[in-house]
Amino acid sequence: MKKNLIPPLALVIGASLIIWSINQGGSIGGFIDVPSLIITLVGSFCALLISFPFSDIKKIPIILKKVLITPSVDKSDLIDQFIELSRLSRSQGILTLEQEIGQIDNLILRDGLQMAVDGMDPTDIKSILEIKISNMEARHEVGQTIFLKWGELAPAFGMIGTLISLINMLSQLNDPSTIGSGMAVALITTFYGSFFANLLFIPIATNLKMQTESELEFCEMIVEGVLSIQAGQNPRTIEQKLSSYLDNKSVKSKEIRNSNISAVQSEVN
Amino acid sequence: MKKNLIPPLALVIGASLIIWSINQGGSIGGFIDVPSLIITLVGSFCALLISFPFSDIKKIPIILKKVLITPSVDKSDLIDQFIELSRLSRSQGILTLEQEIGQIDNLILRDGLQMAVDGMDPTDIKSILEIKISNMEARHEVGQTIFLKWGELAPAFGMIGTLISLINMLSQLNDPSTIGSGMAVALITTFYGSFFANLLFIPIATNLKMQTESELEFCEMIVEGVLSIQAGQNPRTIEQKLSSYLDNKSVKSKEIRNSNISAVQSEVN
Amino acid sequence: MKKNLIPPLALVIGASLIIWSINQGGSIGGFIDVPSLIITLVGSFCALLISFPFSDIKKIPIILKKVLITPSVDKSDLIDQFIELSRLSRSQGILTLEQEIGQIDNLILRDGLQMAVDGMDPTDIKSILEIKISNMEARHEVGQTIFLKWGELAPAFGMIGTLISLINMLSQLNDPSTIGSGMAVALITTFYGSFFANLLFIPIATNLKMQTESELEFCEMIVEGVLSIQAGQNPRTIEQKLSSYLDNKSVKSKEIRNSNISAVQSEVN
Amino acid sequence: MKKNLIPPLALVIGASLIIWSINQGGSIGGFIDVPSLIITLVGSFCALLISFPFSDIKKIPIILKKVLITPSVDKSDLIDQFIELSRLSRSQGILTLEQEIGQIDNLILRDGLQMAVDGMDPTDIKSILEIKISNMEARHEVGQTIFLKWGELAPAFGMIGTLISLINMLSQLNDPSTIGSGMAVALITTFYGSFFANLLFIPIATNLKMQTESELEFCEMIVEGVLSIQAGQNPRTIEQKLSSYLDNKSVKSKEIRNSNISAVQSEVN
Amino acid sequence: MKKNLIPPLALVIGASLIIWSINQGGSIGGFIDVPSLIITLVGSFCALLISFPFSDIKKIPIILKKVLITPSVDKSDLIDQFIELSRLSRSQGILTLEQEIGQIDNLILRDGLQMAVDGMDPTDIKSILEIKISNMEARHEVGQTIFLKWGELAPAFGMIGTLISLINMLSQLNDPSTIGSGMAVALITTFYGSFFANLLFIPIATNLKMQTESELEFCEMIVEGVLSIQAGQNPRTIEQKLSSYLDNKSVKSKEIRNSNISAVQSEVN
């Protein structure tokens, strides 16, 4: 787990750009309108509260923290870890892995190895891990769906706000000279809706989706690795199998790093 | 089954916000227009009546009640129930489950256990339960589809209403000073369409979809549990299997609660 | 087969509502414009003729008749029929079903039973019935697709009509006082496109889709039933299997009705 | 292969309707604007050239010819052909089919029969034919995708053209009386984009899609037929199997036509 | 690998067309506005930075290079190569392929052959190659997704820019004569968003998608070929199998070219 500063930085730069753009032809003061903000954000949040179970809505802060923190899904490290575990298991027996398990952070890997050590049937291990993974995926998907929906609802409530202002203005149209400023106020909720959807909610939903995809691939590697270790496959085969998940550049840099490991390990076999 | 007050509360807050926003620059009176309401809501309802069989439309009140009442799909409780049933079945024979069945509310669980007690073939039990579940899902999907369609049709009829008012106004344009108020009236149906779609129909459709997904997962656990009991698996394995459906936090809190149960149950095995 | 009057009634009510709404602020005369009707309906129909083979377009009247007539897909009756057939087959041999087949309307059921009586291999029966069903589905889908496309093309041609009127009006803009009536005429094609799409074409497409889904489920039950009869399963099992396709309310009302049948039939076994 | 005159005729009628509609309130001269045509059509074509490999773009004339010529996919004829081939193969040995193959136009059928005569393994025949079919489908899909994309890009470039004209006009707004004609010119590219997309590109894409679907079904029948002939199944079974692909009306008319064939053929068996 | 000049050429022509179209009714100077460019491009890029991991964003230059360079995926050459390898393997043993492997550029082919030479189990080879291919596909898909998202975000930020200018202009509306030029400036960001999305980002995304599809098909052929060689199938069968991936024209031109090869090779068998 390490902090990922790029998303908040990009948000700050994007928001600054928009403020700078506003100041090019007017002043930021004309764009701050609390009632408009309330109708756009709180209104769409009410629609979210109707759409999703409250237990999911409560997780929004946790979900947001995920955008700021990159989970450690280093595939190269995982391969090294499996090579290590495989060597240990083949030289000293699979039961010696028991003491390694405590130091593992990744829950899927820990549970998988524990079941392998317990001598559970490989088909059962596979199906239990796959249920765990698909449920993890389902839970992450709720986060994406909430932000995706918010990204649809915010502009919709922005448009509702604009319609309200327009109808109010048009029905009291005594002095034509006020049309301009009335229209300006009416368009602010549309602006808010578009701003929050395109710079915040939709990018967050995409971010969560990309993270889920990368975690799923990582979990797939874990399942492959755990089953290979239980089957007693040799470290070289495990490395070859799991390296299929790396792109070519990573494979090459890995090969240089691992040339020693391979040398050592080939003696073991 | 317990009442879920959050959706109606969120609706009230959202609607109040919109009324408050209207009062900021005008009066609520200018937004109440019964003919506009009729064309938007009744018009789109007519289109629904053409789209869906009347037997499905009649279920709208029942579907709405589902939004207000959360079904008891507590996965932790279900796991406890299966551990209990498994212990009973292993110690006193599967036939003793017969008397437990009467007290079970969940129909899928009841039918599943009944078939297990009747000694039906596991493949048959699985396929019958899966047909039941997929038909339950299909019936729930009709509810979602109706509200999703209504969420599309309401803004469409809102726009039809606006077009009618605009055409009427423009074709009789003698006094330019009436354009403003004419436009205001024309936009009210657009406002109604957007309001009902985004604060009511689409959120209800999403709500129903989330409920169906959570019920499906629950049913999947039931199928897994019933088959495990019939296969005579020990309570510990059943717990481990079904716990894959819980997230990590729930697992942990469960483990603390269940430590006694496990202790007791390990003596049985 | 019985007439379903709700769709045409809903169409009449919906159209009346719109006429009433027009009369609120103008007269229906201003909304009747034959050239606009031609460009919207005939124009979009020309695009349909390019899109679909003429042999499919010719089926539009037959497809429309399907909206007015509900096919008899009473699942409860089907289950009763299968129980009856199963009893007959078990007591007097499967060949006695031959004479029953002539009285069956449903073609899938008739062909399925005929093949079962002919002693064809169950796998072959299943695959032939599934090809028949998937081809029936493909044919029905063409109907849905035509109306769905029409629902997209009608507003598009409505907009083309509006663009034509707007360009004509704007390029000859000598007397500003004619803008209003010019705009009114221009918007009529948009109104027509939206009206036909949302009250007619899209609802018809949805209606056909719902019918196909319900027929598919019915056919699925037939396949299940035919194979069960050929396998010589007892009526009670067939009932239990097929009841999975009913919702709980239907099951209950069925159980009351069938209690006698079951009583009778249990003597047979 | 026979010419299909309906699509070009429908296009001519549709275009005439639009010209007639233009002449109702103006003159066709005001709608002909070569620069607008270039920006809409050539602009969107440039975007196509970036999107698709040139080898695919070059096939546009061939693809267009497909819209004008209906391939001979008469399912009834195909069934008759298979019955004939099956009788020949059963009475005189599968090798006699060798001389029939030369007269067959359809490449999938020809290759399939050749492999059957060569005594290739049925699983191999099936997998080779399926690869051929899925590659044929992939090639046809490129044609659909190109026209679908063009149907999206043409209105987009139409809007770009309108934006250009609007910005030019608005930035030089000295004489308000020119707004009308300026707007008229600006809207012409939007009109072009909508016209080409809805009367040409999208209908062509749909047309190609329907043709591919019908060809796929035809190919599926061929695979089924070839494998049945190789397996030496009797003509009656082959007819029954392949008739599942016909709708009921076609089956009936077929049965009348084929009653003689069946009579003859039943003697053979 | 050879340069593909068509995409950049088409881009230059498309952009020139638009400049020419601007010059028809105004001057290009009025369309160059650096702040508008910044809000549209940099703003949408900030949203991309929130959406995607930075490691993916960094690959944009590499992705763009892919649009300019066509990978050598000549299916005919690949078939020739497999025929050659198959002859070698059958006449002198599969181990002789070891020295050929070094000269092969395509990584999937190289790894596949290496595993075949190493005598790895065919099922393992297949599953490892499929993991490699599906991971390659996943990596390519990120490129498409980035440009597709950019194609959605650019018009969205264009609209945000237009809203900002409109609100600024409308709230300071003292001199009505400035509306025109204000609107012109406001629309420039909309123009930029539409221009970049439709001539650049969306076409690039489509281009990448078509390339991935063609590479996937190529990889599928490689897997088929490698497994056939390991299974020791004869060159004629391999040719026949892999030719299923060619369209008919390519097959014919291939047959002429290969008639000699076949002649030679038939002696070998």
Image (tube, coloured by chain):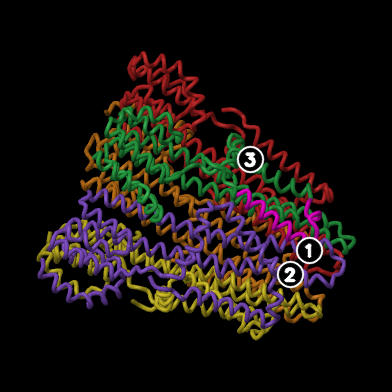
Chain colours: A red, B orange, C yellow, D purple, E green
Q: Residues within 10 Å of mark 3 (few under 14, many from 20)?
A: many
Residue corresponding to mark 2? D185
Q: Which is more toward the observer, B90 or C128?
A: C128
Q: CA distance from mark 1 to mark 2?
A: 11 Å
Q: Position of residue B216 (x, y in %)?
A: 41, 49
Q: Is residue C193 magenta?
A: no
Q: Which is more toward the observer, D239 or B186?
A: D239
Q: Chain of mark 3?
A: E
**Three-letter code, disc 1:** Gly
Q: Is residue C264 in view?
A: no
- Quarter holding the C terminus of chain E is top left
**Three-letter code, disc 2:** Val
Q: CA distance from mark 3 to mark 2?
A: 41 Å
- Does residue D48 appear to the left or right of A17 in the view shown? left
* Chain-order first, disc 1 or disc 3: 1
Residue corresponding to mark 3? E50
Task: Indicate which label's residue lies in the foreground, 1 or 2.
Answer: 1
Task: Indicate which label's residue lies in the foreground, 3 or 2.
Answer: 2
Q: Position of residue A51 (x, y in %)?
A: 55, 52
**Three-letter code, disc 3:** Ile
